Structure formats: C-alpha cells, structure tokens
Image (spheres, coloured by chain):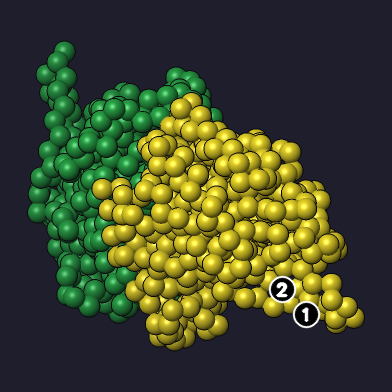
Chain colours: A yellow, B green
C-alpha cells in the first residue's frame, strides 16, 4: 500500500473536510485591518486538544480556553487581533466568556446548536487594555454569516489574526493512501515576536478531518509542540496569550494510527515554525543553533537556548560577523556540563573553534547569507538538540520600541 | 570621635598611599590608543583578594590570576586592552604566565624583588586571538619606568584599560577620623557591554592603604561584588575575563574594623557600578528594576533579572513607552512565586498596574527622561532586590554588530 504525503502552503484551516472559517474587519484595530477570525467545526466529531503558554500571567482568553478544553471537545474557535485581553482582571475574563457566549448564540441562530463551553477564545495584541466589546460582539454576529469552506475562508482567517506579521501563515498536509483512505491536516499561525521560551505570542489553530480521540490529539500535539514551537526562540520573551489548538472533525471517516497522526501534526507544526521564524520581527537572518555532544537532550536544549538568546551573539550574526568567542562566552554561562578544552564550534559547516581555541581562517567564514547554522560540540556526551532563532537587528529595536505608542 | 567619608571621582588606584600606576600605548591595539596598564603595590603589606567570572569558559589571564591569588598576596597587576587572550588554549596560558614573569623581572631590575606569582594578569578585548606578545613584553619593560603616584598614574591606567568605554572610570573614598586616623580606598573599572549575570567584561582594580588581612579583604570584596557588580545586568551576557581585584598596602598603618572596610568597599563598588551603567554600550536610559513583595531576596533577584534581560521591555524603555504589559509578561516566565491577581507595577513612582490590571492613566506616564525606575510588587512576601540595567537601543545593535569586523 503506497502512502503519499504532500504539504501545500496555499491552504490552511479549511483544507480539512468539515471546517469552515472566516476573517473580517470588526473595527477592533484602529487601522481598519481584518481583526476577527472564526474557525468552525461542522463535525461529525468535535474532538479537540490545546497547548497553552507556560507564563504565570495568563490572558483571560487563555484561562477561558484552558477551562473549556478540559472537555476535550470544541465546535469553534474565535480569534481576535488588536488586543490581547491580558492583565484585564475579572472584567477581562467576563469579556472572554461573553465573546464565547455570543459565538455560541450566533451559531445556534444559524442552525447549529452550540454552547459557550464548546467555543475557545484567542486574543493577540497589546497587553493591558479591555477589548472594545461592542465591536467584538457586533463582529461575532457578522462573522458567522461569512463562514466559508475552500481556500477563501482559511486564508481570510489567517489574515485576520496577524499583528506585526507581514504575511499570513498557513499550510496543509494531505495524507493519501492508494486505497483512497485520504485525510488532511491543515493549520494557520500568527506570531512574529515574543517567541519563547516554550511558545510564542503565537496563535495556532490546526484542523483535521481524521477521526481521533481527544487523547490521541493531545498526545500528538504535545509531542509536536515540544519539538517545534517549544524550540523556536526569537527573543527569550514568552507571551501571556500563546495558544495552539487542534480540532478534529472526523469528516474523512479515516482513523489514522497514532504514529501517522503524530507525524502529520509534527510536520505541519514544523512548517508553521519555519514560516514564523522567517517572519519574526526585524529578521535579517534565520539561524539554527545546534548543540551536540551534550550529556542529555535537555542540557543540549538549555545550551542551545542560552546561545540563541544572547544579545551579543545575535548582534554579531546581524553584522555577518563570525565572532565565535561570543558563542563560547554565551554557552559558558549556561548551567550545563561542557569541556572548555575540547569544546568546538562551526559556522555554516566551517570549524571556527577546535578544542576550545580558534581554528585557522575562523575570522574569514562567510556569514553574509540569510541562513546561518551554528553547531556547538560540548564534547562530553552523545545528546543533541536544535533551537531556531534569528539575529538582533535595527528593525527589531525599531519595531519594538514603537509598538504601543 | 567624628568620622567623615568623601567620594572623589578624579582619583583612582593611586589615591591610596603605597600605590603607583601607569598606562601606555604598547601597540596591542591597532588604533595606537593606550592599551597597557600596571598597578604596583609598594607595601609595606601585599594582601590581596579577587573575584572572577562565573563563566565556565575562563580566559587564560583569569586562570593565571585565580592561581596566584590563592596566596592572598599581590605586588602588581598588569592589564591590557586590545585582546582578551580567551579561548587561546595552552599557548594563551603560557602567554599570560610569560607576561607575569616579564613584569616580575622588570620590577626586580627596577629594584623591587618580585616573583611572577605576585603578579595578576587581566586582559580585555576580542575573544579567540593570541596577544601580540612581542608588543606586550616590550610594553612591560617600558611601563615599569612610567610608574607614578598621584593622580596621573591612576588616570593613565584607567584610560589604558578602556575598550568600548567612552570615559575612564575611577573613584576614591577618603575615610577621615578627627584623631587623624585616615585611610583611603580607590579603584578603577572598565566595562561597557557584556555585563551579567554576575560580573561584566569588566576589569576592576581596587587599592587601599588600610591594613587588612587577605581574609578581611576577601570578605569585604565578596559581599560588595554580590550587591553591586553581581546586580548590574546590561545584556544578560557574561564575560570570559571578568576580574575584580582588591590590594592593600597597609601604608596608612590604620587597621579599620571589618564593618568600616565592608562599607568602604561597597561604596566604591557602588559608585563604579553607576559609572559602568551610565557608560554601557548604546545606553540612552539608566534603568533600575526593583522587585518587592517576593518570598525571598533570591527570588526578588531572579525576577528583577528576568525583567532586566527582557528584550521587549528594554526596547519599550528605549522608546519611552510605558508598556507595562511587557513587564508582566517578562516576570511571568521567571521561576518565582507571584500572585497574578495582586501583582503591581509602577514606573517612576506612578502606579501603572494594580492587582494585575491596568491603572488609570497608565499609558500616559512620562518615561522621556534618562533615568527610569520600575518597581514590581509580587505581593507574596517581604523580600526585595534591585537590578541595574539599561535600554536596548539602535546604538547597542550598531556597536555590537560591528565590534570585531
């Protein structure tokens, strides 16, 4: 039996059967740009799982969605840009709740009996302000009538959740078997800064027409998140609003094996990660930091993250400067086992530091391209891990010093 | 008995009796700027203590100086800018050793019998290259003849250790008692970037004419370093070369109490810290982050450091933007106990977040001045701590992307 898989970036949350979506301008953003998105699961199944920020300060929509996800079931996800509804106290939580109630009422009016407990809420934007609820609630009533399948609905939704993103991010994986047992997993993402340490100011909605239990979805999503969004580290900051949701409609009537499901979720998350990294705020370089020779995978992650977060490393990479000493200084303060006499570093495959000292030609390595790989061998074990990051540029400073003002 | 103390910033390592110093251009820097400094203790005592980088990757001069300091005795400190002699392997350590030998030989020729084991070595500059030893050794021979007391020697030395510093940093504390039992503690510092988490690419030499044992010096220096240099955090990076040395000549014949000594070392270190912060790379704002209401002082330090290192907080401050949500997002990922419903934040004394939500007028707080204070109340205990930091500016990115190229 031949299995084929194909990734398509022109499709997103509506690539899988049983899903409709929409994106509209509800007036939440002063600019008039699209700012409200709805993803709707037509069933027949409503299994769902979620992963949320590890930040102790959780936005109201995160608190709401974590609560509704305990049922393992979702009919719809309402997402807004233009305001994070974070640090807004009890009134902010009531706003998130009221939004879910409004979505449930609108969907019920539209002919699909839905309860607020089946509606997840995601928000992104500035922390600390209440949402303009008159606009949100009017938008909810309107958006239900815009729900569409096919490519349009998914792309509209992907555009409506953008903040400082410059392009919408979506992808779909088509899983085809010669016998005709085909199923699809698609998704959309937003997030351009504040990506780390475990998630991003990142909203991700994944949809599949596969048949899968909430437990199966949770397992696949947890594994994939750890290896992808959890290892994307743009600036060491971690949002109050990070949310990754996975909804299954069962519309294909195919129940994939756990390993096929794991693989599909991982590949879609990996692809969305690459898109997030490429569009991160002020990016001029896409950087992958790989640490090898660590005593454990966890120490490899800690070491790679320490390098990925080091401002002096990141500014050197912005300047295409093969200043490997900063890599050593950065990894030297990480709480990991290493051997200063045997540690090695290479940039783009060229050794620049061997056994803790400079290699011939180290200062001449060409880092002028947009993609840079840094490999650090701690020389004390067999474990390895990679963290994706970016450089630290003038554009990053510019964008982030002017964000709220 | 009246005790008076006075801080004077026009004096440094030669303010205390028994010390001479010099700074010359030895040709280590391609620019021809001063790059070699010597601090010489004429005695009668030679007690000394040191604090070194916690980075696992330690430069050759740090390894050398840590070794000689085990004797609790130093006659001289030789310092160079223009090269860190870090990650230079065994040959680099031999270079540090050879430099100490050369200083000892030159001082012996000059009439003061000295061994290499009485000479500490400090280096600062680019990591990874060997020093031009012909120039270092010729410079050592020359600099011994330039040793001078008074103000000139100390200021020349303070200038010769500068890298990206824009001004020399020195200060002296005069401790006067009506009975005439006067003693002095002075010092110089360099360091402008890479300040954190425990020390900086920072070289500090302190000298005193007080009589004090190596243990007394060590106790005073450890306490002061923890509270000052250890809480100065510019960019989360920590150097391979950080060194703080304290030398006592005993020339005043006054033996201060431990608490007077502790106090003097603390005050001189605090003042040097303020100077380092003000001259940090690309600084436009001097920021003090204070965390109160923590369950322990250690948690207060961890929380304040997490905020001080957050790129999104630092870019907002560069933009004079009272974006307090970023402060909450930053402290929320710190591994400390806090109460999201009761946490409070104020900027420059104005409350911007009360009980986890925005305060009226929060977006209008004026942060346009050069000094910004951020106070975060975790609302779970009684402990507090402060970290000094700076903003993250275009100039920081510029300076650090062009440093080695």
Q: CB of mark 2 within 8 Å of CB of mark 1?
A: yes
Q: Chain of mark 1?
A: A
Taking the spot 74% from the left edge, 43% from the top edge, the residue there is A72
Residue that lies at the very extreme toward the top in this rendered image:
B1
Taking the spot 59% from the left edge, 54% from the top edge, the residue there is A39
- Secondary structure, mark 1, is strand
Q: Is residue B405 visible?
A: yes
Taking the spot 11% from the left edge, 19% from the top edge, the residue there is B178
Give the alpha-carbon distance from disc 2 to disc 1, as whole Å: 8 Å
The N terminus of chain B sits in image quarter:
top left
Horizontally, residue A115 falls left or right of residue A399, namely: right
Where is mark 2, residue-wise?
A: A174
Image spot of residue A36 (x, y percent): 47, 51
Q: Badge 2, how many Cα within 10 Å: few under 14, some, many 20+?
A: many
Judging depth in this view, the residue of B188 and A62 nearest the camera is A62
Q: Badge 1, how many Cα within 10 Å: few under 14, some, many 20+?
A: few
- Please determine whether, in this image, residue A308 is positioned above or below residue A96: below
Judging depth in this view, the residue of B391 and B237 nearest the camera is B391
Image spot of residue B394 (x, y percent): 25, 61
Taking the spot 25% from the left edge, 30% from the top edge, the residue there is B361
Where is mark 1, residue-wise?
A: A4
Image spot of residue A244 (x, y percent): 61, 52
Horizontally, residue A345 falls left or right of residue A390, namely: right
């Amino acid at each position: 039996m031949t299995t084929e898989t194909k990734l398509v970036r022109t499709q997103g949350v509506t690539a899988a059967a049983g899903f409709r979506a929409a994106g509209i301008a509800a007036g939440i953003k002063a600019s008039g740009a699209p700012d409200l998105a709805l993803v709707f699961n037509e069933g027949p199944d409503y299994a769902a799982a979620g992963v949320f920020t590890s930040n102790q300060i959780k936005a109201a929509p995160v608190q709401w969605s974590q609560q509704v996800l305990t049922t393992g079931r979702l009919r719809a996800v309402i997402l807004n840009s233009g305001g994070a509804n974070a640090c807004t106290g009890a009134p902010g939580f009531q706003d998130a709740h009221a939004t879910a109630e409004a979505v449930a009422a609108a969907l019920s009016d539209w002919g699909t009996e839905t309860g607020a407990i089946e509606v997840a809420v995601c928000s992104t934007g500035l922390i600390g302000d209440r949402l303009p609820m008159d606009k949100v609630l009017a938008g909810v009533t309107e958006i239900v009538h815009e729900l569409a399948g096919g490519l349009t609905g998914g792309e509209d939704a992907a555009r409506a959740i953008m903040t400082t993103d410059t392009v919408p991010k979506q992808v779909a994986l088509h899983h085809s078997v010669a016998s005709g047992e085909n199923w699809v997993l698609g998704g959309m993402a937003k997030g351009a800064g504040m990506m780390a340490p475990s998630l991003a100011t990142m909203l991700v909605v994944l949809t599949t027409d596969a048949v899968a239990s909430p437990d199966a979805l949770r397992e696949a999503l947890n594994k994939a998140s750890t290896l992808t969004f959890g290892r994307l580290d743009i600036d060491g900051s971690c949002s109050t609003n990070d949310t990754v949701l996975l909804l299954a409609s069962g519309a294909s009537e195919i129940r994939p094996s756990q390993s096929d499901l794991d693989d599909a979720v991982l590949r879609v998350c990996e692809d969305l990660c690459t898109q997030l990294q490429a569009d991160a705020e002020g990016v001029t370089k896409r950087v992958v930091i790989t640490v090898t020779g660590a005593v454990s995978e966890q120490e490899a992650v800690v070491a790679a993250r320490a390098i990925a977060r080091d401002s002096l490393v990141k500014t050197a990479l912005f300047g295409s400067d093969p200043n490997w000493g900063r890599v050593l200084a950065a990894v030297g303060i990480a709480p990991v086992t290493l051997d200063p006499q045997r540690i090695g570093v290479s940039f783009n495959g060229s050794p620049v530091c061997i056994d803790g000292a400079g290699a011939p030609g180290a200062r001449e390595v060409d880092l002028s391209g947009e993609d840079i790989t840094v490999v650090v061998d701690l020389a004390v074990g067999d474990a390895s891990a990679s963290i994706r990051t970016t450089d630290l540029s003038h554009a990053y400073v510019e964008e982030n010093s002017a964000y709220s003002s």
